[in-house]
Amino acid sequence: MMQSCYFCKGKVVQQPTSVDFWWGDDLKIIEHVPAGVCTQCGEKYFEAPVYTQMERLAKGASEAVRQFTVDVVRYSAA
């Protein structure tokens, strides 16, 4: 796994994280994902098997543990 962030060169540490994962028009939030996370900018790095499992989960291979509603607003210059 990466030791330093590709973007900001910050330190990358292994820790579980939550991921907003889009599959087409569907958004899934996947919790407790093992990842390398930059301590400076928050960029997340995943090993290939982890990403493959996130794709499976996003396709609906797992039952949701909870649901919530999110407001969608359109940007408008003030």
Image (cartoon, rainbow, N blue to C red):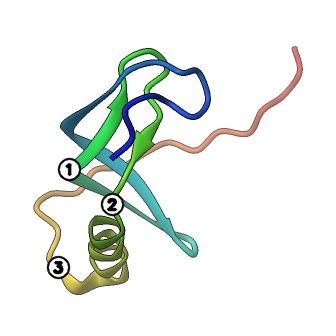
Percent from the top left, x then y, of residue 7?
61, 29
Residue that carries the numbered disc 1 in the rendered image: 34
Q: Residue at x 38, y 20 (%)?
A: 11
Of label 3 and label 1, which has the lower sequence position? Answer: 1
- 64 up-or-down from 8: above or below: below
- Relative to 21, 62 lies left or right: left
- Type of amino acid at the residue the image marks with label 2: Glu
Classify mark 2: helix, strand or loop: loop
Of label 2 and label 3, which has the lower sequence position? Answer: 2
- CA–CA distance in space, label 2 to label 3: 20 Å
Mark 1 neighbour density, 10 Å: few (under 14) some (14–19) many (20 or more) = some
Q: Residue at x 17, y 79 (%)?
A: 62
Residue that carries the numbered disc 2 in the rendered image: 47
Asked if marks 1 and 2 touch (Cβ < 8 Å), the reply is yes
- Type of amino acid at the residue the image marks with label 1: Pro
Percent from the top left, x then y, of residue 52?
34, 76
Q: Residue furthest right?
A: 77
Residue that carries the numbered disc 3 in the rendered image: 62
